[in-house]
Amino acid sequence: MSYIIDGHNLIPNIQGLSLQDPDDEAQLISLLQEFCRAARKTVEVYFDNAPAGQAHNRKYGAVKAYFVRQGITADQAIEARLLRLGKQARQWTVVSSDRRVQTAAKAAHANVISSDTFARLMYEAGQREPSSNENQPALNATEIEEWLRLFGKDDPPIK
């Protein structure tokens, strides 16, 4: 099953994200990429209020982001997407706590879950995925000294 997500509706439900952050959309897309990788799902996420001339669609792996132009809301874009899906809407889950979006999704026979429920799903999917270095053996003291010698323990950090 794939997801259609009301992005600005989900952001306040994700710990560490805020609609006040200038890069909140990029942060959410990054988290959704991790979710898709862990849960083996695909996502379409909709953000409204794209600045003039910056409305576009972009694919980020299994995440397709729609930056909706001003004058149209993400809610309207999601409703239009559900109409285009027709009977295939049954194979999608719409993520939003907005009653208008939920009503449109139910009318299209799509599944519906709230943003806070999906935020928990994202967290749980991330917990099951091992971190990239979890299976790496720890370095012993000799190896650490070798790395420090190679890269200069007293060298100033690169900025």
Image: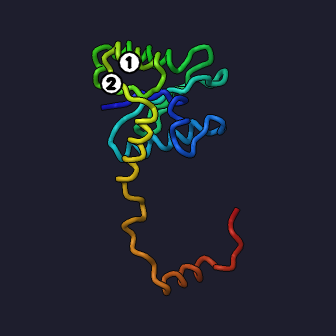
- In front here: 85 or 122? 122
In the rendered image, residue 154, in percent from the top left (x then y), is placed at 69, 79
User: Badge 1 local density, few (<14 within 10 Å), some, or many (20+)?
Assistant: many
**Where 75 sits versus 142, above or below?**
above
Answer left or right for 3 relative to 157: left
Residue flagged by tag 1: what amino acid is it? Ala
Answer left or right for 56 relative to 96: right
For residue 105, the mark is 1
- In front here: 85 or 106? 106
Residue flagged by tag 2: what amino acid is it? Asn
What residue is rendered at 71% in x and 72% in y? 156
User: Badge 2 local density, few (<14 within 10 Å), some, or many (20+)?
Assistant: some
In the rendered image, residue 101, in percent from the top left (x then y), is placed at 45, 19
In the rendered image, residue 124, in percent from the top left (x then y), is placed at 38, 47
What residue is rendered at 41% in x and 42% in y? 120
Q: So how many labels did they put on this image?
A: 2
Q: Quadrant of the C terminus?
A: bottom right
Marks 2 and 1, how far apart at CA: 7 Å
What residue is rendered at 41% in x and 20% in y? 102
> Is the C-beta separation of discs 2 and 1 under 8 Å?
yes
* Residue hosting label 2: 111
In the rendered image, residue 143, in percent from the top left (x then y), is placed at 48, 82
What residue is rendered at 59% in x and 83% in y? 149
**Where 104 sits versus 46, above or below?**
above
Mark nearer the N terminus (2 vs 1): 1
Q: Could you tell me which secondary element the residue under label 1 belongs to?
A: helix
Q: Quadrant of residue 48?
A: top right
